[in-house]
Amino acid sequence: MFSNLLRDCQLALPELILSGAIILFLLARLFSTVRRLQIVVPAVIGVAIALGISIDSWSEIASRSQLAFGGLLRFDGFGLFTRIFLLLATMVTLLTGLMTGIPDREDSADYVTLLLGSTVGLMFLASSHHLLMLFLSAEMASLPAYALTGFFKGKRKGSEAALKYVVYGSAASGVMLYGISLVCAVTASASFSELQRVIYIDRDNLNLNGLIGAVLIFVGLGFKLAIVPFHFWGPDAFEGAPAEVAGFLSVASKGAALAITARFLLALVGPYSFENAYINMIVTGIVLGFTGTLTATFGNLMALKQTNLKRLLAYSTIAHAGIMLLAMIPLQNRAMAPILYYLIGYLPANLGIFAAIALIRNHMNSEAISTLAGLGTRSPAIAAALTFFLLSLLGLPPLVGFITKFQIFVSIYEMGALTGGLDLLKIISISVLVIAGLNTAIGAGYYLKLIKYMYLHESPPEAPKIPLHLGYQIFFAILVGTVVGLGIMIDPVTKLTRLAANSLEVIWK
Amino acid sequence: MYEHDLILMSALIFAPAAFGLGCLLLPKSWLEFTRWFALTGSVVTLILSLILLVDYYNRLDFHRGPKTLNDHSSLLEARVDEAARRASLELPGSREGYDCYASVPWVEKFNINYEIGVDGLSLPLIVLTTIIFVVSVLASWSIQENIRVYFAFLLILETGVLGVFHALDLFLFYVFYEVMLIPMYFLIGLWGGARRKYAAMKFVIYTLVGSVLLLVAIILLSFVEVRDYFDKSMVDTTAAIRKRESPNLVESDARSMRTFSIPVLQRVGQVAMLELTGQAHRIAAKPKSEGARTPRWDPKPRPDGQIELLGREVSTGEAKSRRADDPIYKSSYQYLIFILLFVGFAIKVPLIPLHSWLPDAHVEAPTPISMILAGVLLKLGGYGIFRIAYPICPYAAHELSGWIAGLGAFAIIYGALVCLGQTDFKRLLAYSSISHMGYVILGLGAWTGGGAWQYWAWAMNGAVYQMIAHGITSAAMFFIVGVVYERAHHRDLNGLGGLWASMPFFGGVALLLFFASMGLPGLCGFVGELLVVLGAWKFSPLLTILAILSTVLTAGYLLWAWQRVFLGTNPNTAHYPDLSLREAIILLTLLLLAIALGVFPQTLVLNWSEGSITGLAESLSLLTR
């Protein structure tokens, strides 16, 4: 028993380190000497240690999936990949905060503890193997995020955003909890592997309540992902939150929610076998295809007419969530590989954009699109970096956004093409592809609009130059390098994502 | 000697981008040095392309018999096959040196390769590109704002263009195709005229729509099962490796092959055509090894009419049964893919009615960019149809050839008629580009199958020659507009006139270049048009007569334009200085090329380009009964 606990703790070491760091930072406030210290730097070090340990454990965990803490958590390559992704996102967010000085010395401890707390929650969420754990970790991730959204204490918009986020978030949690209780009642367990067993072996016990429960859980997850029609909180929260936090919400929180959605849906459809594969694919194809295309199209269309940068990016995030949902349609383990690639390519581009917005806000005190006017001549380095990020989100080769989109399109088409005579699946895959392709064209409308503002519009006469220290030039250069590098060196990452996706194999207890 | 080809061609592709990025690192105040640095970059690229040309020429000289024009040395497919066969040997044999082809794995999961190579179809366009870029860098001396960024974009654009001309892998092709988009957007949008924002956006949207169509076609093509088109030994090796990695793989999955390689997909298209025209019995496998020696593959039909399209030792019967459920061999799919590819490229050509971005882009773009746009970028559309649309979907291309030739002839006449009504000098030249590129489409469409294939070969050679000739004359014409604009600061034909008096030297050179564009014998424009018209006559006398008649219109609008600019008296233009040394060098270089290509078409180009183009026409034509 005890040795088991030790092993489990070892598996969850990165999370434990972060938790320890949180406690340390909270205690630090008690001592007057350290109270005034900028806590962000030690936090970066803590995250770096956790990141190092996670990467170090890759070969061990990716090769053998295992359950831990009595089956509450599952440690496998997929979860580890997501955790590394989350730690990287947290790291970039912290560095952005350091650059823009948003947590000043006074409140850096608050900021850092909230951010790390949310990260720990998200990491547990990505490894959950039990509905209860899913709920707990989702709450653990959300509560700090609510507070972070309202981090600008004096700003009305910030408080409004936080309130909206809390109200929507708690309603969604309630719905999810209700769904969980329904599912538990039907299957007499809340573990994912138990769910699979009940659905595929003891089918007789299933009834409508279980289905309703599953749908309610999906609704709760849909809220986290901000898919249409559960997206209303997104634009408001993004607009009110500091850009640094908005970036974290759009990348980290979305990534973890996507990972757990994948786990949950895979648990529902069970192991891949021929009897159920087609039926599953048709059902999920219709459900996911419909919500995904709706989300992507709606997000892109709404983004076209936004005037606030963060609102525009909120809708762009919604659109990307739609595309990632579409990527799940083939609902097999291997279909999850492109999603992981998508996430890892999405990270530098989106966080880079939010970092640039934060810098612009610091100097111009506004986040309207018009602040970009003439940025190309005022601050050529930031403008060039932004151009790379935006083009990657649009999906132009040779940037990473292209190869990720390409992989997803291929995986959707593959589902339709390789399933022999089933015309319905073909129709689904082709129509999804057509709509996704059209969405790329709509996306060009607003991404290119931002680039147009930066380079083709005259800068307003009083607009300041935005200075960029050498360190932060390097910071942006690394992000741009990642966006380009991952788009060209495709093979190494593809291997990792495939390994991670394959590790989703079912573990029967 | 594998590395020789890889290094030379990669250096040629990426040298401009390297110099372009170098421009960004120079200090801001070194204006003159930046210009010379960019010029050095483009000249280095030109030299590399000439080295490649010499390599290719040597190769032809060394391998080609005295009689045969298009044997394995000039046919790219044969070279690709030979390279793939050698690479798949148990003990990979030494690659043949200097065969102007290289392939390196890029993305293993999708079997995407960094596969590049040149032949008589792409090499003339590559040399044209490097020449036009040198000339346009020279023409960029008058650009004053932000020149570091300007030259960076210009040279990155060149890398994109050269990459497209080299790529033999559809994915790689697409990547380079898209790389050109953003530099061009900025070059028009930042350094352009008054309505540059509108023109740049229009350019991007048209191009993006075209490339989305291409992407869809590429994804469809990447799902074609191509195991029958590789040698059996190679598929065996691949299957063995896959089984070692995942032991419970089903045999048929382990042997499944996908590819983005254009030469392989080309054979798929040819098989589809034979299948759909009821000639499935003509499909054969490549020759087997005889002991240690493997005979070379010849893409041409054997004396008994069979065509070797399948891989070595592939059973024709099994291949046939596998073809039964693959949708790619259905005519609907062939039409779908062909139309996606053709429309995607036709936007770039541009073919009426997809042309409306071109006049706007030309009018707003600065002079050097107009020169590149007309001289090089339009050729990408034509090249794409030549290299991808036609060879990969010959069935649909053949069935639709009447429509395509008709569209080409219509573009010739329509473009010329619209020219007559223009008063903006640049807009006139933009429509004249549309008219001239019509000849390329007409030449392509004039598919006279079966025994009369030589006529089509003429037309195809003419079409390629027309692309080169138009590249040179249109670049020259746009530079002439630039020279006039720098002095007059407007382009209104009715407000000009009298330049002959103030600029006699310029007037003379311009007149000769106008003649070259018109297609007067002895100048480059004539050769291409003549070959196209000769070949197209067999296909459709009516369309040919229309094309010939429209040369009267061409002469009309060009001479009328020249007259409005140079003749008469005009006090406003009397003080204009004649050409500067730099301007004279640019115009004289282009004029020299126009004359040389008009007088020695065989020696300068056709000698080494004809083999591949004629080979393409032959291998496609002989698919028809």
Image (cartoon, helix red, strand yellow):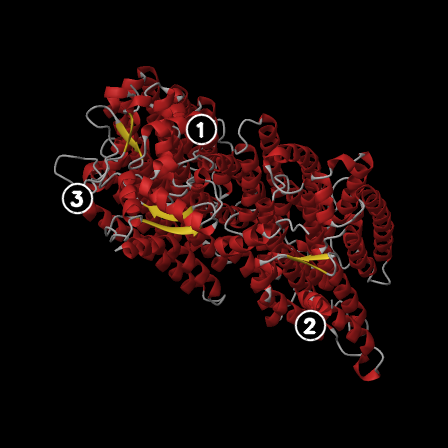
In the rendered structure, which amino acid carries the disc numbered 2?
Gly
Residue A161 drawn above or below residue B557: below
- Give the spatial CA distance, label 1 vs label 2: 55 Å
Q: How many marks?
A: 3
Give the camera-side residue of B543 and B71.
B71
Residue A148 drawn above or below residue A3: above
Q: Which mark is residue A46?
A: 2
At which x and y percent is residue A51?
Answer: 63, 67
* Residue at position x 39%, y 47% in the image: B240
Image marks 1 and 2: residues in contact by CB distance under 8 Å: no
* Left or right for A443, reference B114: right
**Identity of the residue furthest to the bottom in this view:** A33
In the rendered structure, which amino acid carries the disc numbered 1?
Ile
User: Crowdedness of circle 3 by 10 Å Cα count: few (<14), some, many (20+)?
Assistant: few
Residue carrying label 1: B328
Q: Are marks 1 and 2 on the same chain?
A: no
- Give the spatial CA distance, label 3 vs label 2: 66 Å
Callout 3: chain: B
Under circle 2, the secondary element is helix
Give the camera-side residue of B211 and A89.
A89
At which x and y percent is residue A359?
Answer: 69, 63
Give the camera-side residue of B586 and B275.
B275
Image marks 3 and 2: residues in contact by CB distance under 8 Å: no
Residue B132 drawn above or below residue B441: below
Under circle 1, the secondary element is helix
Q: Which mark is residue B63?
A: 3
Under circle 3, the secondary element is helix
